[in-house]
Amino acid sequence: MSFTSFHFYVFLIALVILLRLVQHNGQKKMLLLLASYWFYMSWDWRFGALLFAMTVVNFYCGRLIRYSARPKIWLSVSLLFSLGVLGLFKYFNFFLANLDAVASMLGMSSHINILHIILPVGISFYTFQALSYTIDIYRRQLDPVDSLADFALFVSFFPQLVAGPIVRASYFLPQLAQHTPADSAAQQEGVMLIIRGLIKKVLLADILALHLVDPAFTDYANHSSAFLVLALIGYSFQVYLDFSAYTDIARGCARLLGYQLPINFNRPYLADSISNFWQRWHISMSSFFRDYLYHGLGGSKRGNVYINLVLTFVAIGVWHGAGWNFLLYGFCHGVLVAFERYMRKYGWFGSQTGWRWALAVLRTFFLVCVLRVMFRAEDLHQAGGYLQAIWQNMALSFHLTTAGAVALLVAIVLHLIPQHYMALWQQRYLTTPQLLQASVVVLLLYSMLMLGSGEAPFIYFQF
């Protein structure tokens, strides 16, 4: 049940109405828990059992970490189970395929059968959410929750379950303990976030994919270098609009239900360095790896800080997918971040102003776009072929549809508009008569849902 489908909004409206009819907070949470499992199992009913197992194991590991004499053992159980399940579903076939390739290179006959394992939607996200709970308890930064139902709702809360943002237990569990119904201002904010997300997804990201990105990557050998470069820029904006759209809709749904989810993006293509880019892009994920892996490896205090940075970004790359292209994607970003840190250490790299800042932003955006090839390509072979086609098909002529050109231009302009102007326009809309607001909302939702029809999945569903 996609955020761009009509059925989802029937489900959401019905849930909001039912929550208003229930007075007791415990009953509201139980209703939300049932709705979240129903939402997740609508993708595949078997996913519910996996989500429940992840919940139960980490809930009891959290209690044993705090109250047993050997907390490290139970933290290890939590890590091994959670990461083991993630590895089985996401990386096992990748491991078998590479094992088979190595055996063939050594002249050994292999009869390894690739298993047909379905990748559960959102497993990378809710695995990390569950781990944030047990790790924080081990670090004495969080007390274990008494209610299994509360913890289950934290892990399965449907707005962010499938594609984030990655919400930490210390952020969300206190909201469950002191839940307050959404007031008029929260409801208006929620509706605006949902509309903004749908505009990004249906009217911009999907059009960029259809008219620019997909044609280039599907048949890159027969396109000019100018078109391929433009498609790389288009893909950079497509993946940002697509993912931030999901986050906007998730945050909007949570506000309608009376909860808050963290901001996940801060205009990442205005970053003046790769380090700054990762402070603005998928903030919940990058901060998770920073706090739980980079600092766990020693950060800048133990070991070699540059190796720690590269290893962290390799893990970020592999988190996105089982493929050498994702590993190389993370490695390249890690090397760039480590290089920037080295340069900054000796005063050769720092914050810029004026035209120097503009050049730094352009340089960073260029690097991000080039590395996006590995993110979009199915494997390293396709990534290399795409870059080779840019080098060989030197021509400026290309055919770009009007819809694709308009979508790309609007995406760039919206990214450059200062945030306070966007907030001002939103405030002006909210001061208009409520009947006019409702009419605009209904018209926009209907038109976008009919255009989207739920056929184009969000990009991060595959992760």
Image (spheres, rainbow, N blue to C red):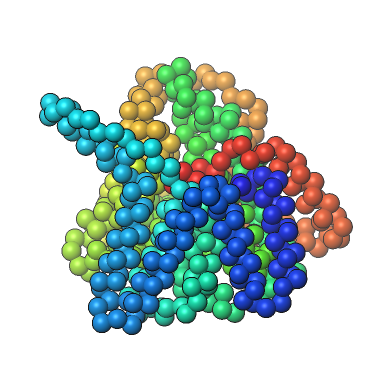
Residue 125: tell me if it is visible: no
Q: Position of residue 213 (x, y in %)?
A: 52, 31
Relative placement, left or right, of 174 versus 252 is left
Q: Position of residue 372 (x, y in %)?
A: 41, 39
37 is higher (above) or lower (below) than 327 = below
Relative placement, left or right, of 109 versus 115 is left
Relative placement, left or right, of 79 versus 434 is left
Relative placement, left or right, of 138 versus 462 is left
Q: Residue at x 65, y 27 (%)?
A: 402
Residue 62: tell me if it is visible: yes
446 is higher (above) or lower (below) than 388 = below
Q: Residue at x 56, y 78 (%)?
A: 177
Q: Residue at x 61, y 46 (%)?
A: 2
Q: Give the image quarter of residue 296.
A: bottom left
418 is higher (above) or lower (below) than 30 = above
Total marks shown come to 0
Q: Give the image quarter of residue 322.
A: top left
Q: Residue at x 27, y 67 (%)?
A: 76
Task: Looking at the picture, tell me which residue is in the foreground, 220 or 119.
Answer: 119
Q: Position of residue 150 (x, y in %)?
A: 53, 72
Q: Position of residue 407 (x, y in %)?
A: 62, 36
Task: Looking at the picture, tell me which residue is in the foreground, 307 or 417.
Answer: 307
